Amino acid sequence: MIQATGALAKKVPVSRACEALGFPRSSLYRAHQPRPESEKQPRPTPPRALSEAEKDTVRAVLNHTRFQDNSPRQVYATLLDEGIYHCSISTMYRVLYEHNEVNERRNQRQHPVYTKPELLATDSNQLWSWDITKLRGPAKWAYFYLYVILDVFSRYVVGWLLAEYESAVLAERLISESCFKQQIDPDQLTLHADRGPSMTSKTVAQLLADLGVAKTHSRPYTASDNPFSESQFKTMKYRPGYPDRFGSAADARAWARAFFNWYNNEHRHSSLGLMTPAMVHHGRAAEVTAQRQTVLRAAYEKHPERFVKGLPAPPQLPEAVWINPPCTNDGQDESS
C-alpha cells in the first residue's frame, strides 16, 4: 500500500493520492522519513506507577492459592473488605498482562489427581461394591432411594435398604448390618463406591475405620470404575414387570425384596459360569460344576456322535474378578 501510494503521489498531489487509496498521509510521510533511533526517547515512568517490588507483591497476591481462581475484581473487593489496598483493579490487570496471565486465571486451580482403582477379588467377601439408585415415586419429582451392597466376586446382594431420602446415617446402618450378617473380620474386606455424598461422608468413613474395612472410590464421572453395581441396577430396571412408578415406599420395598430373592437365588449369571450368585457366594460352585459335569458325561456316553468336539465341559467360574485390571506391557488387560 505504501509503495502504491508513493507511486501515485509522483503523478498527482500527495493528498489526492492518499484520498484515492484510503491511506493516511501521516503514515506515508512517516514511511519516507522515519525517525532516527537516536531521537526516540523512552517513555518516562509516571510518578504514580508501582515500583517493581510493588508489582511483584501484587502478582504474588493474585496468584496465591487463596485467589488463584478469582478475578482481579473479586480479589480487589475481598482485600478492601479486609482493610488492604495494593492498587486499582485496572493496575491488577496490567500486572497480570505483563506476564501473560490475564486469560489463564481459571486454569490455575490445581484439581486433585484421582487414581484409577485396580481392585481384585478371588473369593467372596473380599471386595464389595455399593451404590444408591433412584426409583420413581407416585408423582413427578418424587423418588425412593434404593441402597444396594453387592459382593463383586459372587455378585450376591449382601444387603439392601429402601428409604425416602438419601442419608449417610442410613448408609452407615446398612453397611454395619451387612458386615455383621456376613461375619466380616477386620482387614478382610474392601468396600468400593463412587463419590456420592453418602459414600464420602465422615460418618461412613469412621464406621469403616472402626470395622477395619478398607474403602476405595471411583474417579469422578467414571461409571466404568463401579461396573458391577451399575450392571446390577441395569438388570433390575430392565427386568420384566419393573414398574414405571411405585405408588408408595411399601410397594417399592416389596418389589425390591422379590427382585433380590430372584437375583440371588434364581438368576443364572453369565459371568459366573451360569451359576446363581447364591451358589458362588455360599461356596457351592465346585459342587455344582461337578454335578453338571456328571450330567454332561452321561449324555456324552449315551450319544458320543452328537458331540463333535468330544466330551463337553460345563461353563467355568472365573478364578478372579477385577475392577479395572492392570494393563500389561502390550496394552492388554491381565484378565483377558
Image (cartoon, rainbow, N blue to C red):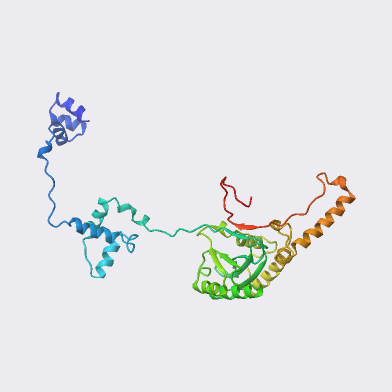
Q: Tell which residue pokes out farthest to the top in this image.
A: 11
Location of residue 139 in the rendering, given as x and y in whole percent from the top left corner: 58, 69
Q: Tell which residue pokes out farthest to the left in this image.
A: 39
Question: Is 227 or 290 nearer to us in this picture?
Answer: 290
Location of residue 159 in the rendering, given as x and y in whole percent from the top left corner: 64, 71
Relative to 261, residue 68 above or below: above
Q: Quadrant of residue 62?
A: bottom left
Relative to 198, residue 336 above or below: above
Give the residue at x 54% y 64%. Answer: 216
Give the residue at x 82% y 46%. Answer: 310
Location of residue 38 in the rendering, given as x and y in whole percent from the top left corner: 10, 38
- Is residue 133 visible in this depiction of the protein? no
Number of callouts: 0
- Is residue 216 visible in this depiction of the protein? yes
Query: Which quarter of the rendering shows the N terminus?
Result: top left
Location of residue 319 in the rendering, given as x and y in whole percent from the top left corner: 68, 57
